[in-house]
Amino acid sequence: MARVVAAAVYAKGKKVSDISLDQGAQWAAQDGHFVWIGLHDPGSSEVLSLQQQFNLHPLAVEDALLQHTRPKLETFGDALFMVVYSPIVDDDKLVFIETQLFAGKGYVISARYGESPSYAAVRQRSEAQPQMLEHGEDFVLYALLSFVIENYRPLLDQYHDRMEEMEQQVLNNPLSQEDVEQIQATRRDLLRLRRYLAPLEEICQDLQHLDFPFIDKLMHPYFRDVAIHVQRLLEDLVAQREMADHAIEIGLLLESSRQSVVQRKFAAWAAILAFPTAIAGIYGMNFQNMPELSWQYGYFGVWGIIIAGCGGLYANFKRMDWL
């Protein structure tokens, strides 16, 4: 259900008043003021109303209504349209919640589609920093982007802990099909995280170079700071993907080693059993002229040879660590 989470007008770093959705353009036109509107699951009627008020570009509105576009930053004259995604885990499944940002001289509009963490905390923190909020629209963009990036860190930490557990599991136990499926599912989630996170670095780089009336050059270092955080997250993603790959490789190597041990044991026991089998085969031949057949102690002698030979083979294989 569409609803307005918050809509307020700000001037000189302080909140002037809460406003209704249809009052936004009126306040945004006043010098030194800007409006910050937050929407949750807006419908086409709300988006089209904002288009009329703030003269939003038709292509930006079209993308907003279609939803599910890739993360991006597009500029339309002196206004911009941005799409970013926040990751959440819903019923043990990784889900990405879309947020659309419209910004121009005098306004910032955020539209969140889904149950990602609320941006109310961003508004509260921003209002608690009037010296920064005095920068206006560019600081709000920075605060929103920074909040989106913050949502990735706890999730990556969870995946890191999961990969360490998987590594220990693979080292201590034979690699099972369930282990392979879990590792592969984690690799797939990490790839999806990278697909949604990587464009944010480019977005932050672009924001550092945009020459917009509402983006102060003094805010460029802040966007650079967000880009640095994105780079670190991407580095962690690469490291965790390598951990997943190594876990499978280690599991396969250990499984191959275990199979080699089993094969050596089979080969050793086969050799031991082959010795008495050969002797029994010789004395099982139906020849009349076999001198040992008439020997009084032949039976015990053969058993002695078998025991001695098998014992010697067992001791040798034991010394070679084949048994």
Image (spheres, rainbow, N blue to C red):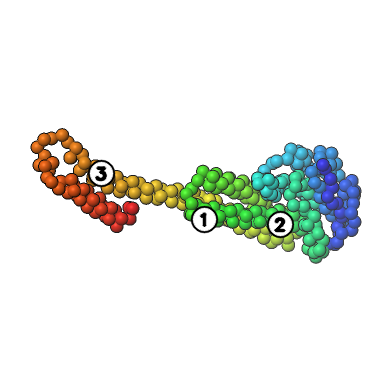
Which of pointers 3 and 1 lies earlier in the amino acid sequence? 1
In the image, 31 versus 49, the foreground residue is 49
Q: Which quadrant of the rendered structure holds the N terminus?
A: top right
Which residue position holds label 3?
A: 274
Element type at mark 2? helix
Secondary structure under tag 1 reads: helix
Image position of 225 with respect to 242: above or below? below
Residue type (three-letter) at the residue carrying disc 2: Ser
Q: Nearer the viewer, residue 61 or 265?
A: 265
Residue furthest front as drawn? 296
Identify which amino acid the numbered label 3 is placed on.
Answer: Ala
- Chain-order first, disc 2 or disc 3: 2
Give the mark nearer the N terminus: 1 vs 2.
2
User: Does residue 172 appear in the picture of this structure?
Assistant: yes
Circle number at residue 168 = 1
Please name the residue shown 11% across and 42% down the image. 294
- The residue wearing badge 2 is 146
Q: Is residue 205 visible?
A: no
